[in-house]
Image: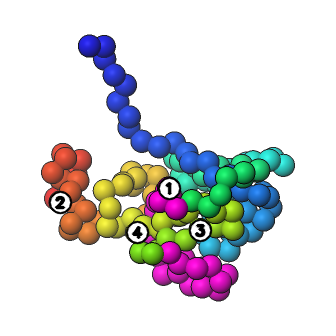
């Protein structure tokens, strides 16, 4: 059997939206972010060593189960911003659809296995984030963190 490439992470996620300016306004009302670049048909939201790409011209219907998890330092400001925008929360946790039907789940950095290096966190202005004991234990079982 031939060697296989090892999948080691996600560089970016692309969301199709109806209008780039409207999408930047919507997501800017919810999140503090830096724009990595943009054109008339695309925008790139910086997530440190990753990015979220907004691409104009969504053609499919709203997402149901299909979604992605966006990691944040604090979920409460997201909840408040969504309420202020009148965005309906979906079935569980902090899940919502943007105006173009993209389903997004908001997860806390401290309670999941996903990790960024201290240098990347500091560069993003969120240095000092920690993990819950449960997340540390999950990572330690995989040899990815010392408890």
Q: Earlier in the sequence, mark 1 or mark 2?
A: 1
**Residue 16 x, y percent position in the rendering:** 68, 52
Mark 3 surroundings: few (<14), some (14-19) or many (≥20) residues within 10 A:
some
Q: Quadrant of residue 2?
A: top left
Residue 66 bears which disc, if any? 1
Mark 4 or 1: in front is 1
Q: Is residue 5 above or below residue 100?
A: above
**Residue 75 x, y percent position in the rendering:** 47, 76
Q: In screen coordinates, is 125 left or right of 111?
A: right
Per the model, the C-alpha gap separating discs 4 and 3 is 18 Å
Residue at the spot 25% in from the left edge and 62% down from the top edge: 135
Q: Earlier in the sequence, mark 4 or mark 1?
A: 1
Q: Earlier in the sequence, mark 4 or mark 3?
A: 3
Res. 128 in view: no
Q: Is residue 76 above or below residue 21?
A: below
Per the model, the C-alpha gap separating discs 1 and 2 is 28 Å
Residue at the spot 42% in from the left edge and 42% down from the top edge: 9
Q: Which residue is mark 4?
A: 108
Q: Which residues make up the magenta segment?
A: 64-90
Q: Secondary structure at mark 2?
A: helix
Quadrant (top left, top right, bottom left, bottom right) of the C terminus: bottom left
């Amino acid at each position: 059997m031939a060697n296989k490439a090892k999948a080691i992470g996600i560089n970016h996620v692309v969301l199709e939206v109806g209008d780039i300016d409207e999408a930047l306004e919507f997501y800017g009302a919810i999140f503090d972010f830096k724009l990595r670049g943009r054109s008339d048909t695309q925008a790139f939201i910086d997530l440190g060593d990753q990015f979220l790409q907004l691409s104009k011209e969504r053609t499919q219907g709203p997402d149901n189960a299909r979604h992605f998890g966006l990691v944040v330092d604090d979920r409460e400001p997201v909840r408040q911003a969504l309420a202020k925008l009148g965005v309906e929360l979906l079935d569980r946790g902090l899940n919502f659809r943007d105006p173009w039907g993209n389903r997004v789940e908001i997860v806390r950095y401290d309670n999941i296995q996903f990790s960024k290096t201290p240098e990347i966190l500091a560069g993003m202005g969120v240095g000092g984030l920690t993990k819950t004991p449960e997340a540390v234990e999950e990572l330690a079982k995989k040899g990815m963190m010392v408890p």
